Image (cartoon, grey):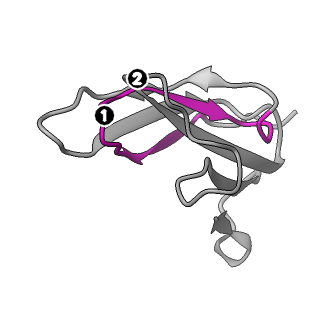
């Protein structure tokens, strides 16, 4: 069995109204878990972070969506501000030749 390390997923979010929640899916949008969101100062961007333990080596499609104080959530498709996606490749060891990160 391969012992995998935790991965810190983080980023920045902004909307006209403060972001009160950021949700992360590590299985292509089937299940969502809450990330930690820093409070908003004035109209600045807000940092979010999420600690994830991959179950195994392989490819994972990560989705991230923000929800503002009025309950507005980013749509999955068809808009400029749609849910962000990234393909992550989890490997046994760092192999710089095969390290990839694709972000939509």
User: How far apart in space, not on screen, are marks 2 and 1 (Cα)?
Assistant: 7 Å
Q: For residue 37, which quarter of the picture?
A: top left
View extreme (bottom): residue: 97
Q: Name the residue: 72% across, 36% down.
A: 26
Horizontal side of 33 relative to 46 (left or right) equals right
Residue 12 appears at what percent x and percent y? 37, 47
Q: Name the residue: 54% across, 33% down.
A: 73
Q: Which mark is residue 17?
A: 1
Please report the bounds of the magenta region as a residue range.
Answer: 6-29
Categorize mark 1 by other alpha carbons within 10 Å: few (<14), some (14-19), many (20+).
Answer: some
Looking at the image, is 88 positioned above or below residue 40? below
Q: For residue 20, which quarter of the picture?
A: top left
Pointer 2 with pointer 1, Cβ within 8 A: yes
Secondary structure of the residue carrying tag 2 is: loop
Q: Between residue 49 and residue 100, name the one nearer to us.
A: 49
Horizontal side of 53 relative to 45 (left or right) equals right
Q: Is residue 16 magenta?
A: yes
Mark 2 or 1, nearer chain start = 1
Categorize mark 2 by other alpha carbons within 10 Å: few (<14), some (14-19), many (20+).
Answer: few
Report the residue marked by disc 2.
70
Q: For residue 98, which quarter of the picture?
A: bottom right
Q: Name the residue: 80% across, 36% down.
A: 27
Looking at the image, is 61 positioned above or below residue 35? below
> Which quadrant of the figure contains the N terminus?
top right
Q: Name the residue: 21% across, 31% down.
A: 40
């Amino acid at each position: 069995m391969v012992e995998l390390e935790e991965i810190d997923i983080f980023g920045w979010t902004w909307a006209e109204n403060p972001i009160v929640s950021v949700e992360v899916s590590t299985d292509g949008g089937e299940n969502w878990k809450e990330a930690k969101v820093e409070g908003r100062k004035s109209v600045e961007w807000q940092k979010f972070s999420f600690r994830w333990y991959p179950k195994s080596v392989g490819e994972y499609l990560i989705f991230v969506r923000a929800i503002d104080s009025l309950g507005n959530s980013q749509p999955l498709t068809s808009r400029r501000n749609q849910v962000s996606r990234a393909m992550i490749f989890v490997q046994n060891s760092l192999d710089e030749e095969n390290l990839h990160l694709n972000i939509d």
